[in-house]
């Protein structure tokens, strides 16, 4: 990979990869480590990408796998640092801010599938491949997450 291609990929994907990792850990430091590890793996890879979308999907998969590996480490801290995450998202309404807070309060497995499904626009089958589970498990996690969000936010947050 050439330097200019790598710089372009980093600029295009850094924030997105950081948010994926942050949704996994809810910890700024761990999210930053995983994002950097993911981008380092991109630099070291000899993989040829068909286009930007192919590279983006590869980076997403790599980031999720690095999150899982990093999460297994005994040195990982589970600090909740939501103030750092709130600065990265733009909220056009208070309702969106409330939805973000509700999503970040979900259990990690539910939070990750919600992020990949709604914020990364990934399909159920893609998410299942990335997190290495059956599509039915992804659907179950999404269903549970929606139920929890409905309990936190009430019914009308979905329809508006």
Image: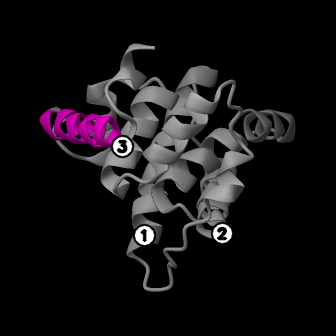
Q: Residues within 10 Å of mark 2 (few under 14, many from 20)?
A: some
Q: What secondary structure is the stretch in magenta mostly built from? A: helix
Q: Secondary structure at mark 1?
A: helix
User: Which of the two marks, 3 or 1, is nearer to us in this view?
Assistant: 3
Q: Are marks 2 and 3 in contact (CB under 8 Å)?
A: no
Q: Which residue is mark 2?
A: 29
Does residue 28 show up? yes
| Residue on which the image places disc 1 | 71
Residue 92, by quadrant, is top right
Q: Is residue 62 visible?
A: no
Q: Is residue 119 above or below residue 68?
A: above
Residue drawn 15% across the image and 39% down it: 134
Q: Which residue is mark 3?
A: 152
Tell me the CA gap for discs 3 and 1.
27 Å
How far apart, in angstroms, are the residues tagged by discs 2 and 3? Answer: 28 Å
- In percent of width and height, residue 28 lies at 65, 64
Q: Magenta segment, which residues?
A: 136-151
Crowding around mark 3 (Cα neighbors within 10 Å: few <14, some 14 to 19, many 20+) is: some
């Amino acid at each position: 990979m050439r330097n200019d291609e790598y710089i372009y990929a980093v600029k295009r994907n850094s924030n997105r990869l950081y948010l994926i990792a942050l949704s996994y850990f809810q910890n700024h430091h761990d999210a930053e480590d995983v994002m950097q590890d993911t981008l380092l793996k991109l630099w070291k890879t000899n993989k040829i990408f068909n286009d930007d979308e192919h590279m983006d999907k590869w980076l997403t998969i790599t980031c999720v796998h690095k999150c899982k590996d990093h999460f297994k480490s005994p040195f990982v801290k589970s600090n909740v640092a939501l103030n750092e995450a709130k600065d990265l998202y733009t909220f056009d309404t208070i309702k969106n801010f409330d939805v973000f807070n509700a999503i970040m309060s979900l259990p990690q497995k539910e939070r990750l599938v919600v992020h990949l499904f709604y914020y990364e626009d990934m399909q159920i089958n893609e998410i299942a491949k990335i997190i290495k589970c059956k599509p039915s498990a992804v659907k179950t996690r999404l269903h549970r997450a929606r139920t929890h969000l409905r309990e936190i936010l009430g019914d009308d947050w979905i329809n508006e």
